[in-house]
Image (cartoon, rainbow, N blue to C red):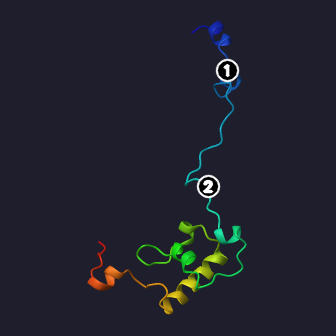
Amino acid sequence: MSNEERSERPERSERGDGGDRPSRPAPRRFGGRRKVCRFCVDHVKGIDYKDIGRIRMYVSDRGKIEPRRKTGACLKHQRLVCTAIKRARHLAMLPYTLAHIRDTGVFPTRG
């Protein structure tokens, strides 16, 4: 390549990033939108252990209390939910385990 050809070709800094399109923000690494606490949205002061319909959404199909990262509840309301679930279980409004696991005694082993 001669000196004339080199001088005609634009340098890398002059070319830019390769197009007329503006640069996009980088895609999010983990998931989409952040979940919002339903209790904060509804301006709920306290969580009643007798409100089984609302509490049942925070219990898994195995009978475990769902974590915050899954339900989207804030820390304050997650603590209240846990207390309400435990009270409802103690008063036999919610089961500790599933009925078929209690009846058969069969629980899948891990590993």
Q: Is residue 18 visible?
A: yes
Res 100 → quadrant: bottom left
Residue situated furthest bottom in the rendering:
91
- What residue is rendered at 58% in x and 85% in y? 50
Disc 2: CA contacts within 10 A as few (<14), some (14-19) or many (>=20)? few
Q: Mark 2 points at which residue?
A: 33
- What residue is rendered at 65% in x and 29% in y? 17
Residue 81 is tagged as none
**In terms of secondary structure, where does tag 1 sit?**
loop
Res 14 → quadrant: top right
Q: Earlier in the sequence, mark 2 or mark 1?
A: 1
Residue 35 rendering spot, x and y as whole percentages: 61, 62
Q: Is residue 105 visible?
A: no
Amino acid at circle 1:
Glu
**In terms of secondary structure, where does tag 2 sit?**
loop
Answer with left or right where residue 73 lies relative to residue 106: right
Residue 11 is tagged as 1
- What residue is rendered at 70% in x and 70% in y? 40
Residue 70 rendering spot, x and y as whole percentages: 53, 67
- What residue is rendered at 67% in x and 10% in y? 8
Which residue occupies the foreground of this view, 33 or 101? 101
